[in-house]
Structure formats: structure tokens, C-alpha cells
Image: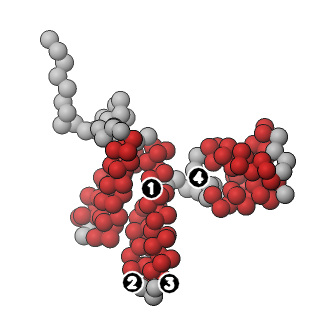
């Protein structure tokens, strides 16, 4: 007698653990539909599509992306919105820029809180001492390690500025 798998229950994917970002997207899409928020719904649908495209690019459509890769997709979507806002504002299209800002706010809700300088400094000190970095030519190695240790929760520009200041 073989065990029957119930495929209609999607509550346990990825070896019994449902990725929180996928659950959050679904819940927010439902709320946007009920609230008739077309801007948020459009942003969420776009995000869901971007996640599916990343899954296809990875080679497995049926497996969800790990949380860190899914967050990178969210960051990429936010970056696209930032670029669009800049272009719309330069072209004098304020209404489209506002729409992009609203979409960006919807997407930003999926990201963890960014680290502050006070939280980054001890990590930076540890990385510099571990790598023995002293000059600007070590910046690439330090940045790579800092991005790993901050798990993408620190803005790249802030990290770059802080590392550059310490290595000068």
C-alpha cells in the first residue's frame, strides 16, 4: 500500500516549509484585490512574475527560490522602480513617478529592515582584521565579505562609503 500525496494542499512546499515571501505575496495580493488597490496588485503581480522568471532561469520551475535569492529579486524590482522614477521625473511625468513610488513602497515591505551604521561598524572592524585589509586595493575583498555578512540588509552605497573611509 503506497502513501497518497495530496497535491491540493500547497501549505507545505520546500520540504515542509513554505517560503515566507511567497506566502506574504499571496496574502498581500488577496488584500489588494479585496481593497481594489490596482497599483499594489500590479506591483505584486510583477514581483510574482519576476520570481517565476528567476525560478525558470535557475532551471526548476516547480521549486521556490531560497529566501535570500527571492529577496534579491525584490531588490532588483525596487531598483527598476527607482530608475523609472528618475526617468519619469526628468521627463516631467510626475503622475507616473508617483505610481512607481507607490509600487516601490509595496515592494519594500518584503525587505528586512536595513542595518544602521552603528550595526555595520563592528562587522566592518571584524572583516578588516580577519582579512588584514589596509589599503584601497583590498576594497573588493572587503566589500564581498561585508555583503555576505550583512546578508544584503545594508545598502551598497553606505557599505562602499564606510569601507572606503576605513581603508583610506
Residue 29 picture location, percent across and down: 29, 59
Mark 2–mark 4 distance (CA, rounded to whole Å): 30 Å
User: Number of numbered discs present?
Assistant: 4
Of 168 and 105, nearer the camera is 168
Q: Residue furthest left?
A: 1
Determine the residue positioned at 38% across, 76% down: 99
Determine the residue positioned at 44% across, 40% down: 66
Query: Is 106 left or right of 11, judged from the image as shown?
Result: right
Q: Which mark is residue 74?
A: 1
- Residue 83's place in the image compared with 30, above or below, is below
Quarter of image, res 42: bottom left
Q: Nearer the viewer, mark 3 or mark 2?
A: 3
Mark 1 near mark 2, Cβ–Cβ under 8 Å?
A: no
Comes first in the chain, label 3 or label 2 = 3
Q: Which mark is residue 153?
A: 4
* SS class, disc 1: helix
* SS class, disc 3: helix
Q: Residue furthest top?
A: 1
Amino acid at each position: 500500500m503506497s502513501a497518497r500525496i495530496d497535491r491540493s494542499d500547497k501549505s507545505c512546499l520546500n520540504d515542509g516549509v513554505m517560503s515566507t515571501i511567497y506566502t506574504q505575496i499571496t496574502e498581500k495580493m488577496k488584500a489588494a484585490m479585496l481593497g481594489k488597490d490596482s497599483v499594489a496588485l500590479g506591483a505584486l503581480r510583477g514581483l510574482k512574475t519576476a520570481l517565476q522568471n528567476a525560478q525558470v532561469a535557475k532551471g526548476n520551475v516547480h521549486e521556490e527560490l531560497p529566501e535570500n535569492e527571492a529577496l534579491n529579486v525584490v531588490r532588483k524590482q525596487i531598483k527598476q522602480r527607482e530608475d523609472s522614477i528618475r526617468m519619469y521625473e526628468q521627463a516631467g511625468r510626475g503622475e507616473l513617478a508617483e505610481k512607481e513610488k507607490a509600487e516601490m513602497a509595496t515592494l519594500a515591505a518584503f525587505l528586512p529592515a536595513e542595518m544602521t551604521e552603528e550595526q555595520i561598524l563592528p562587522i566592518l572592524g571584524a572583516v578588516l582584521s580577519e582579512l588584514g585589509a589596509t589599503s584601497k586595493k583590498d576594497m573588493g575583498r572587503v566589500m564581498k565579505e561585508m555583503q555576505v555578512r550583512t546578508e544584503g540588509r545594508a545598502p551598497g552605497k553606505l557599505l562602499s562609503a564606510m569601507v572606503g573611509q576605513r581603508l583610506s
